[in-house]
Image: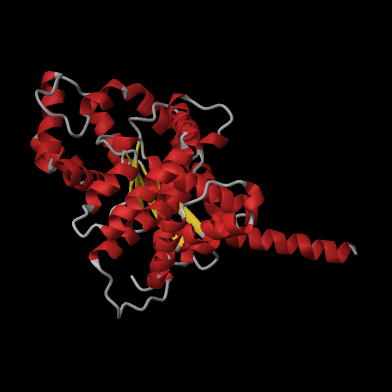
């Protein structure tokens, strides 16, 4: 009996260690620290070559690509606005990289960097462990986490699924909030890896409307599940940044049925209107223009799936077609009417049934 118990303990220890190595990250603080160091030199002339060097750091290249994508402000603007602030103490006109906001929070940003640097390995392991139970064994990921300052995005990924980016300046010194946000963004890397593992048949060609509808359903899955995996409401003593996020969760919870109806309206428009603008429909649900309202819808769906079937309900979705997320949720409330979950209309259920024709085919 003692021998058997020892074997079980050994097996659990071995599996646990193997699992811990499955997802790992390296934190890259270089770009953030470089900007902070520059801003500590206020009212000094900065050589052009130094600004160029800082702009060409890997993380700052990611930042420039992101800011340029939504504002048009390229590396020239990155350098010119930063120089203006450093040499004059102000920026006249637009400040797309939000350098003045960064400067205003300089001490808290440095405190955050120092806290991470004290035991960076423990910090990295903490982030990885938060998403392990929602990650299938087929995913092996070693990600680069670029912690940045500047720009208007809290977190983002661009291109390479092995890299994700998180902005420090909106976070203050809320280290628990940073960990949750990083778990959210790291999980997007996991989703991207899983998406690439699926076997797909791309012989049939969907219509523009079907592609627009599919893209919205993909975003619903991607952001909704990541919002659940990186769940701010689980923080016991939230800092100011975390509390802002929790307040948004609460707001979305109070308007959940209306939000579900809004999603139905957007999906109907995407599927049936041949002149639909996917960009505008995306903005309605997945940007801060309307408080990322579909993040809340996806979060609720993910929460209910996990509550019923455990983490495996979300783990399996990583390597399945994203449209199965809403399909599985519909199945859940149909098979469990006593749960009184928020439901979709029959028209929307029929729309999803038609979209399932494109499972693993887009």
**Residue at 58% in and 58% down:** 334
Quadrant that contains the C terminus: bottom left
Residue 21 visible = no
Q: Does residue 115 sit above or below 198 in this rendering?
A: above
Rendered location of residue 134, percent (x, y):
55, 55
**Residue at 23% in and 64% down:** 208
Rendered location of residue 17, percent (x, y):
62, 58
Identity of the residue furthest to the front in this view: 346
Task: Tell whether 105 sits left or right of 27.
Answer: left
Task: Tell whether 254 sits left or right of 55.
Answer: right
Quadrant that contains the N terminus: bottom right
Rendered location of residue 215, percent (x, y):
32, 58
Give whichever of 272, 322 is nearer the camera: 272
Q: Does residue 105 sit above or below 30 in this rendering?
A: above
Q: Does residue 350 sit above or below 84 in this rendering?
A: below
Task: Tell whether 286 sits left or right of 317.
Answer: left
Rendered location of residue 296, percent (x, y):
45, 41
Identity of the residue furthest to the bottom in this view: 203
**Residue at 65% in and 62% down:** 15
Give whichever of 235, 271 is nearer the camera: 271
Q: Quadrant of residue 32?
A: top left
Give whichever of 336, 212 is nearer the camera: 336
């Amino acid at each position: 009996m003692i021998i058997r118990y020892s074997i079980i303990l050994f097996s659990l220890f071995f599996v646990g260690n193997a699992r811990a190595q499955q997802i790992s990250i390296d934190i890259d603080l270089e770009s953030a620290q470089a900007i902070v160091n520059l801003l500590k030199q206020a009212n000094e002339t900065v050589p052009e070559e130094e600004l160029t060097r800082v702009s060409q750091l890997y993380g700052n290249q990611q930042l420039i690509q992101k800011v340029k994508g939504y504002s048009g402000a390229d590396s020239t603007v990155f350098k010119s606005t930063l120089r203006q602030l450093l040499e004059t103490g102000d920026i006249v006109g637009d400040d797309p990289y939000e350098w003045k906001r960064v400067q205003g929070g300089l001490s808290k940003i440095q405190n955050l960097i120092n806290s991470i640097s004290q035991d960076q390995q423990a910090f990295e392991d903490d982030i990885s462990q938060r998403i392990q139970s929602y990650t299938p064994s087929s995913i092996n990921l070693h990600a680069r986490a670029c912690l940045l300052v500047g720009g208007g995005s809290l977190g983002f990924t661009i291109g390479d699924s092995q890299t994700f980016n998180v902005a420090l300046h909106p976070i203050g010194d809320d280290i628990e909030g940073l960990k949750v946000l990083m778990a959210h963004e790291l999980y997007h890397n996991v989703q991207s890896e899983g998406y690439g593992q699926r076997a797909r048949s791309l012989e049939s060609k969907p219509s523009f409307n079907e592609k627009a509808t599919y893209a919205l359903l993909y975003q619903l899955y991607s952001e909704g599940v990541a919002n659940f995996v990186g769940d701010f409401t689980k923080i016991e003593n939230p800092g100011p940044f975390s509390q802002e996020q929790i307040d948004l969760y609460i707001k979305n919870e109070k308007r959940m049925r209306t939000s579900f109806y809004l999603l139905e309206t957007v999906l109907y428009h995407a599927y049936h209107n041949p002149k639909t603008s996917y960009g505008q429909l995306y903005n309605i649900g997945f940007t801060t223009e309307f408080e990322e309202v579909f993040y809340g819808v996806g979060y609720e769906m993910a929460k209910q799936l996990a509550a019923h079937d455990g983490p495996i309900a979300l783990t399996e979705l990583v390597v399945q077609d994203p449209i199965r997320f809403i399909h599985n949720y519909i199945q859940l409330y149909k098979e469990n009417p006593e749960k009184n979950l928020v439901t979709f209309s029959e028209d929307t259920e029929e729309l999803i049934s038609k979209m399932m024709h494109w499972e693993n085919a887009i």
